[in-house]
Amino acid sequence: MGAEAALYKPEWLTYPENPAELDRRIWTQSFDRADNGELTVDGVRVSQLAEKFGTPEYVFSEDTFRARAREFCTAFEDAFSAHGAEVSVYYAGKAFLTTAVAAWAKEEGLNIDTASGGELGIALRAGVPGDRIALHGNNKSVAEIRRALENKVGRIVADSVPEVQLIAQVAAEMGVVAPIMLRLTPGVHASTHDFIATAHEDQKFGQSLVEGTSGLSGLSLEELLELGLDANDCYAAISVAIAHREQSLDLRGLHCHIGSQIFEADGFGKAAEKVLTFMHEMNQRFGITMPEIDLGGGYGIGYTEEDHPRGSADVATSLADMVSKTCANLGMDIPHLSFEPGRSIAGPSGITLYTVGTIKNVSIEDENGDTRVRRYVSVDGGMSDNARPVLYESDYTATLANRAPAGEQVLSRVVGKHCESGDIVVRYVYLPEDLQAGDILAVPATGAYCFALSSNYNYLTKPGVVATSADKAPREIVRRETEEDMLRRDMGLV
């Protein structure tokens, strides 16, 4: 067997006995089949969407987004009220953010979590009040901090000791008090891809809870002693001490986020226990009461039949039970809790429509040394509209959308049109044997991190975003980019 033998088919992928059936772990109720087998989105046929708006195109169900936003708000409020605690739910805008989306989130009771000055600008433009916005980021500029404070954001999440000091300085110069939370690194392993795991020590986010890491801050022992600390303290304790000392800072609490696309509950529980324990220790040590803990988001969704996402009520109930138990063991009141679902709200709300182009078969040697045929189906988009497969080795599925996907099904690989061999949209999927150029494919669960990560690689224009709703006509909430849009920034011969 050759060293580069390819996996022909993963064990989880099964031959579809009813290829027209939509797996409800992946497809929400906004997606259905018409009598002729054509896919519909909130009652609109995809052929109509493709004819009017073109392909590739992101199609985003407003109905699904709003329903999932309400679902998460209700689930967390109910779960924590049973323990006498209050919660806030922030929509993590980095997953997918436009002014329309920010407005929907606000109307459904969500706050908005932003990760840059640009995202902050979108939230503000959508009319989201400053006190319902959070600003994240590991390297905020002075301009971003000033803009956040000018608009009276509810909190700025500080990622390091230098950033705590910078926020304090900017706030003092402006004559205001900055509400901050401190992002911690709880050291919990998240069962996800390394690139989207964010709670281990060796990565750029957060402040360590490991004893003896205070020296990493660059502060001298004398400076540590002045803060009431010593060399045995952790890095995060320095930020607590500085935030407690600086009159221009209001320490609102602690924040952690262990990663994304996580299905198991254990990691969230362990992170909550570590952060709550640290909060209790700091409260006692400095004679303060930090009022809030943010436990982030990262709840997994269904991309393929391999995935088994947990419902929002299950996620919320298990977290509420874990937090309540930890606080009881520590002898502390449950603080205000906040959470940041993003992918779990936006992801299932969106699909991407592509038009099929070239189809060809290639011969491969599989893991058993046998020769197999793999069908490659090329579409009119790819890694410029969905970078996740090449970034994270993410898997998706697809279905024939413009007609019934009946008859014999052939194992296929859907690929893009970019000049990269890694330009794969769907690695393994069964598609009809009679698939042909001009057919429309729909890739589900692309509502999160596809538009947000899109690019102009190979000078392809970015797709537009079409919003659908059962009681509204389909309309673009982000127009399709044109070649002129791209060339407008090219200064020509200078």
Image (spheres, helix red, strand yellow):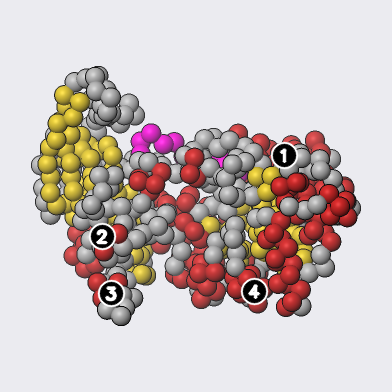
> Residues under labels 3 and 1: Cα distance?
50 Å
Q: Is residue 236 left or right of residue 358?
A: right
Disc 4, SS: helix
Tag 2: amino acid: Asn
> Residues under labels 4 and 3: Cα distance?
33 Å
Q: In this orientation, which residue lies closer to the viewer: 68 or 397?
A: 397
Among the 4 quarters of the image, the one containing residue 172:
bottom right
Nearest to N terminus: mark 4 or mark 3? 4
Magenta-tinted stretch = 304-317
Report if residue 327 is visible in the image. no
- How crowded pointer 1 is (Cα within 10 Å; few <14, some 14-19, many 20+) is rated as some
> Residues under labels 4 and 1: Cα distance?
32 Å
Image coordinates of residue 262 in percent, x first then y, are: 51, 40
**What residue is pinned by disc 2?**
458
> Residues under labels 2 and 4: Cα distance?
37 Å
**Mark seen at residue 210:** 1
**Mark seen at residue 146:** 4
Q: Does 310 lie within the magenta span?
A: yes
> Residues under labels 2 and 1: Cα distance?
45 Å
Disc 3, SS: helix
Report if residue 50 is visible in the image. yes
Q: Are marks 2 and 1 in contact (CB under 8 Å)?
A: no
- How crowded pointer 2 is (Cα within 10 Å; few <14, some 14-19, many 20+) is rated as few
